[in-house]
């Protein structure tokens, strides 16, 4: 299993656990808020690099 698949599987498992323990709206806020906060915490140069790498991978 690739690293990305492991991360995706872990995210799905975490989402299911959050949905069981929390109301659906709180779980949704956490699932969407954590990646958004992590992206906003990057420097502008790091954001540009992340966008550039993502575009390169989309062309494959």
Image: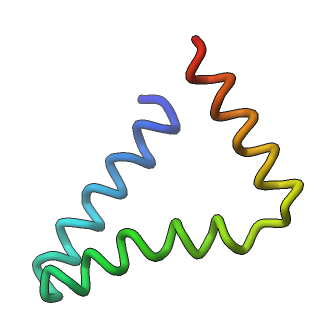
Residue at the location (75% across, 35% down)?
Answer: 52
Q: Nearer the viewer, residue 47 or 8?
A: 47
Q: Up-down: is 9 above or below 5?
A: below
Residue at the location (77% across, 66% down)?
Answer: 42
Residue 24: percent from left, percent from top: 14, 80
In which quadrant is the C terminus drawn? top right
Q: Along the horizontal axis of the image, is 31 left or right of 18?
A: right
- Residue sticking out furthest to the top: 60
Q: Nearer the viewer, residue 17 or 1?
A: 17
Residue 5: percent from left, percent from top: 41, 37
In which quadrant is the N terminus drawn? top left
Residue at the location (68% across, 23% down)?
Answer: 56
Residue 29: percent from left, percent from top: 33, 80
Residue at the location (65% across, 28% down)?
Answer: 55
Q: Along the horizontal axis of the image, is 29 left or right of 54?
A: left
Residue 16's quadrant in the figure?
bottom left
Q: Along the horizontal axis of the image, is 31 left or right of 15?
A: right
- Total numbered circles: 0
Residue 25: percent from left, percent from top: 19, 83
């Amino acid at each position: 299993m690739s690293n990305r698949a492991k991360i995706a599987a872990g995210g799905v498992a975490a989402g299911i656990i959050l949905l069981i323990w929390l109301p659906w709206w709180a779980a949704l806020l956490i699932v969407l808020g954590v990646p958004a906060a992590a992206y906003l915490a990057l420097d502008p140069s790091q954001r540009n690099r992340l966008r550039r790498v993502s575009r390169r991978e989309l062309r494959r």
